[in-house]
Image (cartoon, rainbow, N blue to C red):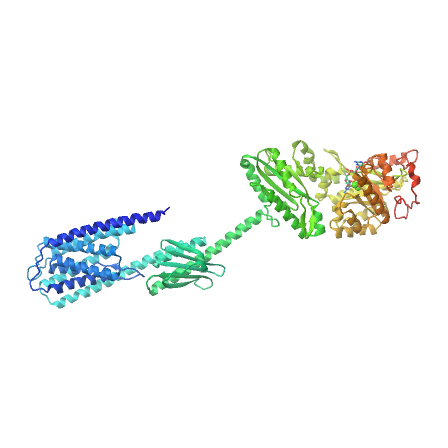
């Protein structure tokens, strides 16, 4: 493919060739006419000398040029008419034509013009001289007379013919070269031309008159004087004009440099400099300390742009200028103008070059400042929409993309949102440190990103929550499939500091809702995610039918304050029983929410909301208060039972918590050892320092501590080594399997053994059947709670049950085991003993 530019050039070139050819043909025709003209020399005139004079005059006339610009060929002032016309007044036309042609030839050869231009100049000379000659012959000019005949009209006409032929030949040529309309070319410098014509005609008339009337030859000396004057005047005019034009061009170029793109600045500068300074090649060595780049250009375009070392240096004469701001505070490298020929810059040229260089330097600095600004603003835009830790888009970006996708129909397919929450991530953070936590989050982000498909958007919402926008799904069922495969990416262990960590996560999927937009989609995914968490599944898909309860769960947050104030939280109690005797030895407090709309809510339905809200302390206090009140009431009735209260992990992190508990004990006048705090084992790993301090404060005050759900977590033993508890509660899942699974039985037995060596008591949870009770007892576990003995119930009902008793024995809820004989009972030390629970079997 050739560019339009070069096609244009080809067209111009063809037109030029055609035109020059036409002129040459016409000139040859004129030459033939010349050859037929009579040659009758004037008697007594030294012919050869005359011809040499004409020839010399022509050369001289051609050489009279105005030199203003570097490498400019000058503005030729057509003084050539003078020697030709004077010659025609003195000598035969063919001779004059020959002499004029010789003069023009010599001039062009001296100028070292290319052959085509020489041919054109010669042809033009033939045509103009012939035209003038023919006009003079037509007006009766007689060369045979002994002295020239002064005919001003004929001379003026001949002069006019010369000018017209010259213009007819020259204007079209310029129009083709400059690709401008002929009329514009003709109008250029019209004033200068007309004045020039008048003076030249006057000169011709003067010379011919002096010769015709045999005037004093000294009078001819006026001619060089006149020429000098006109030439000076003309030079000044042209110089001023050219200077003005060049300043205009310079200022246009400087304006043009005012673009924000550095490359554009450098490219423009190189080509414009070539044009303004008529340099053969312009090189910008852009080296501002941060980069080293060379851009090279000629008038028609950029020829090189690349690293400085790759730039080969063409030969030539160099004129250079530092690229620096006028105050010299900033330097951007060097501007080099290269010329094939030797050039000397005038002061004016040098000044222009310095101006250009400093403007270029400013433009470069502006472009760089602009680029820097643009970079900062994209960086800010990126920071505003991305998570700095993982580099993933953030919540804002997810919202933007999701609403856009919902708005334009998800590109034809189905749109779904997958919300992922890591389970127990806090533990990683708390036990291994934030650096490890960050490493895990980064790896999770990476894996999710790797598993994403084109069109998906993986975002980190904050903390351990991630979300993936799935677009263009072919069917709704695909969402669950994709979600499963994304979560499966987290199955592989993550290595942090040489440790292999397993990450569990729950994912909630929601399909784009008909109404409600992003917010509703997020809410649904959130609901589904909690359903997955609660049910212990990896993923769950949002279903409207299951939403009401969850909607309630989410709304509960706002109602909590009222719930606490209006005492909607109540506490049920489940007795803990001596497995051997069936005697009640204590009771566990279990919170309930009598919700005005949702009815009787169990802790799993609202605990999370309470923990997340600011109402946890108030809630825990309400439960503790009711528990101690109940315990006091039982004691008054003769049943001195300690009460076990569940403590939310988060409560332990509250620095006020120990003091609040001790204050309640004090208010209710309950001895500290009548309170057991049940700690969820999952948390006790977290924030061990804080928790340890809180717990030792409580323990030192006499409060008893129990580790809930013991055995269900992996870290049970390590927790035990750091937290000085009095009691272990065996998790329901082991009790459930105690008869069928040897492993469950082994866990229970080793827990009992461990407890014995640490002098701790053990309580089994969820005892539902007599065989379980027997099995537990045989394994050495002597205390338990569960539906077998009693379901949780109100404090009053429990008291009634205690009074009623079993088999006529108050305070006993079940028949004694027949195997009790196998157990060596130690005397109970109620008042001042370490434990109010039965001691371990020996
Ligand atoms: P948990 O501490 O393991 O409490 C025992 C749970 O097992 C209670 O469920 C209880 O009703 C249930 N349960 C008792 N016997 C049996 C049985 O024989 N079979 C079966 N399948 N279940 C039995 P609930 O009341 O729903 O409490 C659930 C969890 O909520 C509790 O687990 C405890 O961790 C937490 N919780 C309860 N009350 C409070 C409270 O006041 N504060 C805090 N922070 N957490 C509480
Ligand atoms: Ca408990
Ligand atoms: Ca439990």
The spot of residue 701 in percent (x, y) is 83, 51
Against 315, is 733 above or below? above
Asked if residue 812 shows in the view, the reply is: yes
Front residue of this view, candidates 41 and 562: 41
The spot of residue 211 in percent (x, y) is 11, 63
- Residue visible at 62% across and 42% down in the picture: 467
Relative side of 395 to 375, left or right: right
Q: Which quarter is ligand 2 in?
A: top right
The spot of residue 369 in percent (x, y) is 48, 56
The spot of residue 300 in percent (x, y) is 36, 53
- Find the residue positioned furthest to the front: 742
Against 231, is 737 above or below? above
Image quarter in which the C terminus is found: top right
Asked if residue 79 shows in the view, the reply is: no
Q: How many marks?
A: 0
Relative side of 86 to 653, left or right: left
Front residue of this view, candidates 727 and 775: 775
- Find the residue positioned furthest to the top: 545
């Amino acid at each position: 493919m050739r560019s339009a530019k070069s096609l244009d050039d080809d067209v111009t070139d063809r037109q030029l060739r055609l035109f020059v050819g036409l002129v040459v043909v016409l000139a040859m025709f004129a030459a033939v006419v010349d050859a037929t003209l009579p040659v009758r020399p004037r008697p007594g005139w030294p012919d050869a000398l005359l011809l040499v004079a004409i020839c010399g005059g022509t050369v001289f006339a051609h050489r009279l040029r105005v030199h203003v610009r570097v490498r400019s060929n000058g503005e030729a002032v057509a003084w050539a008419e003078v020697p030709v016309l004077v010659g025609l007044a003195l000598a035969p036309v063919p001779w004059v034509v020959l002499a004029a042609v010789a003069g023009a030839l010599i001039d062009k050869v001296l100028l070292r013009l290319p052959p085509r231009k020489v041919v054109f100049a010669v042809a033009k000379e033939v045509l103009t001289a012939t035209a003038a000659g023919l006009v003079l012959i037509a007006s009766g000019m007689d060369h045979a007379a002994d002295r020239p005949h002064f005919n001003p009209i004929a001379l003026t006409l001949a002069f006019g013919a010369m000018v017209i032929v010259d213009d007819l030949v020259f204007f079209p040529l310029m129009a083709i070269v400059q690709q401008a309309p002929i009329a514009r070319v003709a109008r250029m410098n019209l004033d200068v031309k007309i004045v020039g014509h008048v003076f030249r005609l006057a000169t011709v008339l003067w010379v011919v008159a002096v010769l015709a009337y045999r005037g004093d030859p000294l009078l001819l000396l006026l001619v060089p004087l006149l020429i000098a004057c006109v030439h000076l005047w003309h030079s000044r005019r042209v110089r001023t004009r050219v200077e003005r034009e060049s300043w205009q061009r310079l200022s246009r170029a400087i304006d043009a440099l005012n673009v924000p793109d550095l490359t554009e600045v450098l490219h423009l500068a190189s080509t414009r400099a070539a044009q303004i300074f008529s340099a053969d090649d312009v090189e910008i060595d852009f080296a501002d300390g941060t980069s080293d780049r060379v851009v090279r250009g000629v008038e028609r375009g950029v020829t090189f742009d690349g690293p400085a070392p790759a730039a080969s240096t063409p030969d030539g004469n160099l004129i250079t200028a530092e690229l620096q701001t006028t105050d010299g505070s900033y330097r951007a490298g060097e501007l080099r103008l290269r010329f094939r020929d030797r050039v000397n810059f005038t002061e004016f040229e040098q000044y222009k070059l310095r101006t250009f260089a400093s403007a270029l330097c400013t433009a470069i600095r502006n472009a760089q400042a602009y680029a820097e600004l643009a970079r900062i603003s994209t960086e800010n835009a990126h920071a505003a929409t991305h998570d700095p830790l993982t580099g993933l888009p953030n919540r804002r970006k997810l919202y933007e993309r999701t609403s856009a996708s919902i708005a334009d129909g998800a590109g034809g397919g189905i749109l779904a949102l997958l919300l992922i929450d890591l389970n127990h991530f806090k533990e990683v953070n708390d036990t291994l440190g934030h650096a490890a936590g960050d490493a895990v989050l980064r790896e999770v982000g990476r894996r999710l990103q790797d598993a994403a498909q084109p069109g998906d958007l993986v975002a980190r919402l904050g903390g351990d929550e991630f979300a993936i926008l799935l677009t263009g799904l072919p069917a709704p069922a695909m969402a669950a499939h994709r979600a499963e495969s994304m979560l499966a990416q987290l199955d592989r262990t993550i290595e942090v500091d040489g440790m292999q960590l397993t990450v569990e996560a729950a994912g909630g999927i929601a399909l784009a809702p008909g109404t409600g937009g992003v917010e509703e989609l997020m809410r649904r995914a959130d609901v589904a995610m909690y359903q997955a968490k609660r049910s212990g599944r990896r993923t769950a898909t949002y279903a409207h039918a299951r939403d009401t309860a969850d909607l309630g769960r989410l709304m509960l947050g706002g109602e909590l304050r009222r719930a606490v104030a209006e005492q909607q939280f109540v506490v049920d109690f489940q007795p803990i029983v001596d497995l051997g005797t069936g005697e009640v030895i204590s009771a566990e407090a279990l919170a309930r929410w009598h919700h005005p709309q949702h009815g009787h809510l169990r802790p799993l339905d609202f605990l999370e909301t309470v923990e997340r809200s600011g109402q946890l302390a108030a809630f825990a206090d309400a439960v503790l208060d009711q528990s101690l009140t109940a315990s006091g009431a039982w004691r008054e009735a003769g049943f001195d039972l300690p009460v076990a209260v569940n403590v939310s992990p988060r409560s332990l992190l509250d620095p006020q918590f120990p003091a609040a508990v001790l204050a309640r004990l004090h208010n209710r006048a309950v001895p500290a050892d009548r309170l057991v705090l049940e700690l969820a084992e999952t948390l006790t790993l977290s924030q061990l320092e804080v928790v340890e301090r809180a717990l030792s404060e409580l323990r030192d005050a006499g409060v008893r501590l129990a580790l809930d759900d013991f055995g269900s977590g992996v870290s049970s033993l390590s927790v035990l080594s750091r937290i000085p508890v009095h009691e272990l509660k065996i998790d329901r899942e082991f009790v459930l399997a105690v008869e069928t699974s040897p492993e469950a039985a082994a866990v229970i037995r080793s827990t009992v053994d461990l407890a014995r060596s640490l002098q701790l008591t053990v309580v089994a949870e969820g005892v539902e059947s007599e065989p379980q009770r027997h099995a537990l007892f045989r394994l050495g576990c002597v205390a338990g709670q569960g539906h077998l003995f009693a379901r949780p119930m109100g404090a009053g009902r429990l008291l009634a049950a205690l009074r009623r008793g079993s088999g006529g024995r108050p305070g006993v809820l079940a028949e004694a085991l027949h195997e009790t004989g196998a157990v060596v009972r130690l005397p109970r030390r109620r008042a001042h003993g370490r434990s109010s629970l039965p001691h371990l079997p020996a």
